Image (spheres, helix red, strand yellow):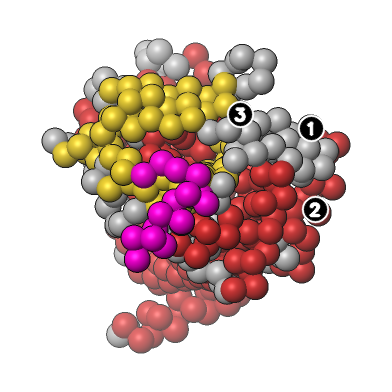
Amino acid sequence: MALTEITPVDVELTDARVLRGDMEVLSGVSLRLQPGEILALIGPNGAGKSTLLSAIAGLVPLAAGNCTLTEADGQDAAITRIGYVLQKPVMLRRSVGANIDFAMAAARIPVSARKPLKAELLAMVELAKYEHTSAYHLSQGERQRLAVARVLAMRPGVLMLDEATNSLDQKSVDLLEHHVRELAAGGMPVIWVTHSLDQAARVADRVIRLEKGTITHNEKADDFFASSASEK
Amino acid sequence: MNIAEFFQLALAIIWHGDHDLIEVVGLSLFVSLSAVGLAALIGVPLGGLLATARFPGRAVVIVLINALMGLPPVVVGLMIYLLLSRAGPLGVFGLLYTPTAMIIAQMVLILPIITALTRQTVEHLSRAYDEQLHLFGLKPFERTRTLIFDGRFELLTAVLAGLGRAMAEVGAVIIVGGNIDHFTRVMTTAITLETSRGNLVLALALGVILITLTVIINAVVVVLRWWGERRYGLD
């Protein structure tokens, strides 16, 4: 069960509208993710980027519109197939290894596959030496890496990263970008919320720009950055 | 005799390890720890469920359990007495004036304390964990279990609060236990009896032991919690 063996989930959001109290935080947002596509979601603070991810994950209800997460066989995807790395992931109060064990158990990963998968993930995020250390003792950057490993331990069919590189040093950023590109090459659709246009330019196949809850740009990354450059 | 002399004699009794004294202390610990163990077995999951489940009337149940934290021990003793007395619905078991009756009474007294404090702890933790646990796709029961496990060091305080109440309790156990020598006499009931008899030295010796045990148990829990927070602490 190698990490790059991926069964993608089809994600489609149609005319999504999300309210927070009386305020509309998402308005008429539609998007469809292609397998293996890395979508960079950009926009100013409060544009609705995190809300969009939360809506896809079912963390916030849609006031209107529709969100479908479909497996290759046409069945609805389980929540554990959505690999959502929260902006502030909560570390369970147990060891690094136990955090990953917990995620694998939650996603009903076959017991025989858990040990090698955990070893692969810990090596991937360079936390193998901390396997028995409490997650509480990790730095912010290490916690972020553990959060990514924990999400991948569930063998998701779509990966959503909410400013997942905020606390990472450049080496860790490069490493994460490299691994995400590998996962995408294996067919994993990815939504990556980022404030860094450089990062979007490095990783994204497509860029969506949100502003005040609506999509203002939805273009291929090359076109988006070419038009941005010409605007300058 | 002045107070200092009372203390000297009391400490001498403790030092010589009087057999009756040891018996009373042993029974006290057995009754209180059993009651706390049983109350924790019921109260911790119940408090966890109250924190995570949403059902009609939940707020009423929470208010009721909070109110029951202040149950008057003599009233609980009386209720248990009525239940266990020969004419009562549980009289057939012949439990009145036995340590089991004392355990039941103490358990009834501390169950609301452990349940209410567990509910508060788990609810607080749940606010931080909610989104993450949703993403793990956990069933409600699994969610509650995870929150209880991750709140285990805070929950020690809830259990400790129950133990404190149990150890200090006298009204209920004297009614349902009867304070029978060598059978249902515990520290608090013995202190009451010896004081009324004027045997202040023995009462004081028991009081010193009771306070010492309470301090030791508190210290152990504080150290455990401190260790847990340092090792697994909260964000």
**What's drawn in magenta, residue-wise?**
A217-232
Q: Which residue is mark 3?
A: A9
Q: Label 3, secondary structure: give it.
A: loop
**Closer to the camera, B88 or B16?**
B88
Q: Which residue is mark 1?
A: A110
Tag 1: amino acid: Pro
Front residue of this view, candidates A115 and B26: A115
Q: Is residue A62 left or right of residue B21?
A: left
Q: Earlier in the sequence, mark 3 or mark 1?
A: 3
Residue A131 lies in what quarter of the image? Answer: bottom right
Where does the image place residue A117, in percent across and percent down from the top left?
79, 46
Quarter of the image containing the N terminus of chain A?
A: top right
Q: Which kind of residue does numbered mark 3 sit on?
A: Val
Amino acid type of the residue that numbered disc 2 sits on in the rendered structure: Glu
A100 left or right of B188 in image: right
**Does any portion of residue A83 appear in the rendered image?**
yes
| Marks 3 & 2, CB-CB < 8 Å contact | no
State the count of labels: 3
Q: Residue at x 73, y 65 (%)?
A: A126
Q: What whole-number distance in Å separates the C-alpha atoms at marks 1 and 2?
A: 15 Å
- Labelled pair 3, 1 in contact (Cβ < 8 Å): no
To which chain does the residue with label 1 belong? Answer: A
Residue B53 percent coordinates (x, y): 38, 29
In the rendered image, residue A94 lying in the magenta stretch gets the answer: no
Chain letter for mark 2: A
